[in-house]
């Protein structure tokens, strides 16, 4: 029988009363006999004694006393009819099973809660701080072949090597050496390359997170974390790939600062998959109409390069800060309709500020000067393809003008303000598979050959055709301002089970000055702009988190001397 009175006793008092009653009951072997004789049982007398002595609180004792008397009355008829106890028999008072079960469950719950809070007496107990940290990483092992056409031009200047050195003397009277040249005809087969990345992210409370990630890489370039093996079995470098703090004041807004993943939805035509962003980004995302419609937007401010605080180092007159920035704004939406059909689109504007080169004031290097006023405008990193201009206006030595050395750096001739349009249509296909169609179109709104020519004052050194009359002009600049890409992907679009696979086929064209060549895909045409061609590949998931991928890129130049480059990659990827 379940007593309503005992249920009102507080948990600790209830356990105290139960323990006391059970202990005393073991000494009262003749309880039922006393009940049959009409006497007050020993149990009742002992409870009264506990109340009088203060061992039980009055309110708890009275409730327990009422329970004992109620049970005594209920058992009286049965006790009267019971056989007289024999010597050696032990009588145990009856405690209702429902009451015992309830007390046991309350004790169990309280003990487990305490153990969980204090991290003791639990087989899976781990320190509390580990619950707030996530460890993630990935590993890739790749075999890569680079295949060049034997019809390629052998004159492909390595302009980044010139900018990273002391300049190239363009005066043929004082320098007979060729500039640094790229390989354009000799294949590079079976290069083994790796990529490893490991990072942690921590929940700091208050809707705040922090993260840091390390990655491999041949150098500190921004577009690739791939490391080429070999090198006499030397140890490989690790770089700080990401360091960031993020805060979500509300569900639909995330603010992240530091060095972090690409915050924009874009293709590798514009930004490499390995590219991370410095600075700060505000990301909006929300859903409407029962999650069928979602809106998103990103505002980002990225410092690309700060001018040196001490430039020029050998002058008492320092230049003011002339920093390079990338400011971006993207808005987009995704609509789910019909049966598993989804349409996603985004429009973005990217403003690259002060990335173009500038012709310097006259600088008398012959007189001992070791800099020119616009040396800072040369890019910190380049791949290839953009139209380049000479930066230095070098004064000639009046005593020997023909033999004055003219070591030059180069900078970007064009300015860059990009309009970027992305579309994606996802739909079901036959056999239970999916089909995804992607399109990307980019236009450089700041491209202007006349301004490029005036800015360089005729010192254009790439993407320039020979003039028929021997007097080149802006009309001889062979460049363009547009890039586009189309891709179709078929199979399991989000692989997650062993045996899942997908394949893709795409075409890409990037005019020389459509985008900044420093930041896009480093595999297609081995990076940069002034490239067009197709690519294809397939992936197969043979482990829960392990898959094999094969890719083929076939690309050639858009303008200028022939430069065809095919790239084959076979790789195994794993993530954890």
Image (cartoon, grey):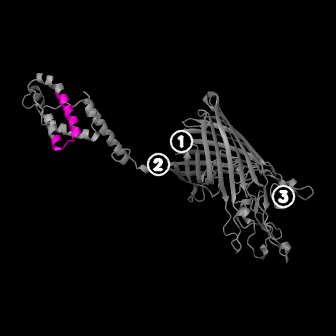
Asked if the stretch drawn in magenta spans residue 69, the answer is yes
Task: Tell me the residue that label 1 is attached to.
Answer: 545
The quadrant where residue 166 appears: bottom right
Choose mark 1 or mark 3, whichever is in front. Answer: 3
* Residue 548 as seen in the image, left or right of residue 35: right
Residue found at the very far bottom of the displayed protein:
399
Q: Position of residue 522 (x, y in %)?
A: 68, 50
Task: Tell me the residue that label 3 is attached to.
Answer: 453
Q: Around disc 3, counting alpha carbons within 10 Å, would you say few (fewer than 14), some (14 to 19), or many (20 or more)?
A: many
**Which residue lies at the image location 61% right of the left edge and 51% below the top edge?**
193
Can see residue 122? no
Q: Around disc 2, counting alpha carbons within 10 Å, would you say few (fewer than 14), some (14 to 19), or many (20 or more)?
A: few
Q: Secondary structure at mark 1?
A: loop
> Can you tell which mark lies on residue 132?
2
| Distance (Cα) linking label 1 and label 3 | 53 Å
Compared with 489, 400 (above or below) is below
Choose mark 2 or mark 1, whichever is in front. Answer: 2
| Distance (Cα) linking label 2 and label 1 | 23 Å
Q: Position of residue 404 (x, y in %)?
A: 82, 72
Q: Secondary structure at mark 3?
A: helix
- The residue segment tinted magenta is 50-72
Q: Nearer the viewer, residue 484 or 43?
A: 43
Mark 1 or mark 3, earlier in chain: 3
Count the numbered circles shown: 3
* Residue 63 as seen in the image, left or right of residue 304: left
């Amino acid at each position: 029988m379940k007593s309503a009175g005992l249920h009102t006793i507080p948990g600790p008092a209830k356990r105290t009363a139960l323990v006391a009653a059970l202990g005393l009951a073991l000494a009262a072997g003749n309880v039922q006999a006393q009940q049959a004789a009409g006497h007050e049982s020993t149990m009742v007398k002992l409870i009264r004694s506990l109340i009088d002595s203060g061992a039980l609180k009055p309110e708890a004792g009275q409730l327990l006393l009422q329970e004992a008397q109620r049970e005594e009355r209920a058992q009286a008829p049965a006790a009267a009819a019971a056989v007289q106890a024999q010597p050696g028999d032990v009588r145990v008072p009856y405690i209702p099973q429902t009451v015992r079960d309830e007390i046991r469950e309350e004790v169990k719950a309280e003990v487990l809660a305490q153990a969980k809070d204090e991290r003791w007496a639990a087989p899976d107990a781990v320190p509390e701080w580990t619950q707030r940290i996530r460890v993630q990483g990935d590993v890739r092992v790749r075999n890569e072949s680079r295949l060049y056409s034997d019809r390629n031009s052998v004159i492909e200047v390595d302009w980044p090597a010139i900018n990273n050195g002391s300049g190239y003397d363009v005066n043929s009277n004082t320098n007979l050496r060729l500039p640094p040249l790229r390989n354009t005809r000799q294949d590079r087969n079976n290069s083994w390359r790796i990529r490893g990345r490991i990072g942690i992210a921590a929940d700091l409370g208050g809707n705040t997170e922090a993260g840091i990630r390390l990655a491999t890489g041949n150098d500190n370039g921004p577009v690739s974390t791939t490391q080429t093996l070999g090198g006499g079995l030397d140890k490989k470098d690790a770089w700080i790939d990401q360091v960031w703090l993020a805060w979500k004041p509300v569900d639909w807004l995330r603010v992240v600062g530091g060095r972090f993943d690409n915050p924009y939805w874009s293709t590798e035509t514009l930004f490499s998959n390995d590219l991370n962003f410095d600075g700060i980004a505000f990301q909006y995302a929300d859903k409407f109409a029962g999650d069928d419609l979602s809106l998103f937007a990103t505002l980002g401010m990225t410092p690309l390069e700060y001018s040196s605080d001490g430039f020029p180092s050998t002058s008492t007159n320092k230049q003011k800060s002339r920093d390079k920035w990338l400011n971006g704004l993207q808005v987009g939406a995704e609509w789910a309709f019909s049966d598993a059909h989804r349409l996603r689109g985004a429009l973005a504007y990217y403003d690259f500020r002060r990335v173009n080169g500038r012709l310097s004031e006259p600088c008398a290097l012959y007189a001992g000067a070791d800099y020119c006023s616009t040396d800072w405008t040369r890019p910190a990193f380049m791949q290839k393809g953009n139209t380049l201009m000479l930066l230095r206006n070098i004064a000639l030595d009046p005593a020997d003008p023909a033999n004055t050395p003219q070591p030059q750096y180069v900078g970007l001739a064009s300015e860059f303000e990009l309009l970027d349009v992305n579309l994606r249509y996802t739909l079901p296909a036959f056999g239970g598979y999916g089909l995804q169609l992607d399109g990307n179109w980019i236009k450089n709104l700041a491209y202007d050959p006349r301004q490029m020519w005036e800015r360089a004052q005729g010192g254009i050194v790439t993407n320039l055709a020979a003039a028929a009359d021997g007097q080149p002009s802006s009309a001889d600049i062979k460049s363009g301002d547009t890039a586009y890409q189309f891709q179709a992907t078929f199979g399991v679009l989000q692989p997650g089970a062993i045996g899942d696979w997908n394949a893709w086929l795409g075409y890409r064209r990037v005019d020389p000055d459509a985008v900044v060549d420093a930041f896009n895909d480093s595999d297609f045409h081995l990076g940069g702009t002034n490239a067009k061609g197709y690519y294809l590949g397939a992936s197969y998931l043979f482990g829960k988190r392990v898959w094999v991928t094969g890719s083929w890129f076939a690309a050639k130049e858009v303008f200028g001397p022939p430069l065809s480059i095919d790239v084959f990659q076979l790789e195994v990827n794993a993530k954890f």
